[in-house]
Structure formats: structure tokens, C-alpha cells
Image (spheres, helix red, strand yellow):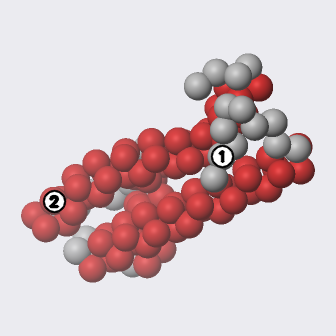
């Protein structure tokens, strides 16, 4: 997927294409994680679809919960989803920053 140390740095056009592919992967991960959260909050937390979207978006973005949860299964889901969201956030940042870091290191011929 990436060029080796001995290869030339890819063109700007190819690099922008690589960035676009990574952004698409990141967006797909966000959509999957958001769908999991929306479903969990809707079915376990008894929230409406729009409230589930709000709650999942706020947790996934790291802002925190909006509405109080009343049932034990909803609270367990919320805690697991919060941990999951933290890992997803780190993974997404890695996906987005990987091509930039690789190009920078490749420009300086570092491993």
C-alpha cells in the first residue's frame, strides 16, 4: 500500500488520492460506530431515533452523554459504547494521519 524507503515519493495527485481513500475508510468507520450506538440507545435506552442519534454522536465525539439512562442494560451499553468510542476515535485518527506521517518520514528517508 505504501512505497518503500528506496522508492521515490509519490506524486501530489497520488498522495491526495491516498488521503481520500483513508478519509473514506474513516467515514465508514464513523458510520458503523454511529449505527451501533444509535441502535443500542434506541433499543436498550428506549430513546427515540433522533435522541439516539444525538446521544451516540455526543459519546462518539467525546462530548459526553446528554440524556439520563434509567435501566441497567442501557447503562451497561452506554459504558461499553463509551469505551468502544474511545478506541474508534484513536483508530480513526491513525487512519487519517498515517498517509501524512508516512509521506513526511518518506521525504526525510526515515523508517
- How packed mark 2 is, by other alpha carbons closer than 10 Å (few <14, some 14-19, many 20 or more), is few
Q: Nearer the viewer, residue 16 or 31?
A: 16
In the picture, measured across the screen, residue 90 lies left or right of residue 69, that is right
The residue lying furthest to the left in this view is: 72
Mark linked to residue 68: none
In the picture, measured across the screen, residue 109 lies left or right of residue 75, that is right
Q: Is residue 39 visible?
A: yes
The residue where tag 1 is placed is 2
In the picture, measured across the screen, residue 12 lies left or right of residue 7, that is right
- Residue found 25% across the figure and 71% down from its top: 45
- Residue found 83% across the figure and 51% down from its top: 14
Look at the numbered disc 1 and give the secondary structure of its residue: loop
The residue where tag 2 is placed is 76
Q: Is residue 51 visible?
A: no
The quadrant in which residue 33 appears is bottom left
Q: Is residue 102 above or below residue 25?
A: above
CA distance separating discs 1 and 2: 40 Å
- Residue found 59% across the figure and 61% down from its top: 25
Amino acid at each position: 500500500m505504501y512505497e518503500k524507503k528506496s522508492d521515490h515519493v509519490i506524486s501530489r495527485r497520488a498522495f491526495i488520492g491516498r488521503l481520500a481513500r483513508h478519509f473514506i475508510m474513516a467515514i465508514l468507520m464513523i458510520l458503523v460506530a454511529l449505527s451501533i450506538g444509535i441502535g443500542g440507545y434506541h433499543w436498550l435506552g428506549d430513546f427515540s431515533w433522533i435522541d439516539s442519534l444525538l446521544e451516540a454522536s455526543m459519546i462518539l465525539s467525546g462530548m459526553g452523554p446528554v440524556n439520563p439512562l434509567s435501566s441497567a442494560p442501557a447503562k451497561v451499553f452506554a459504558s461499553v459504547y463509551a469505551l468502544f468510542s474511545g478506541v474508534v476515535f484513536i483508530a480513526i485518527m491513525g487512519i487519517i494521519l498515517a498517509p501524512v506521517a508516512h509521506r513526511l518520514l518518506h521525504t526525510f528517508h526515515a523508517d
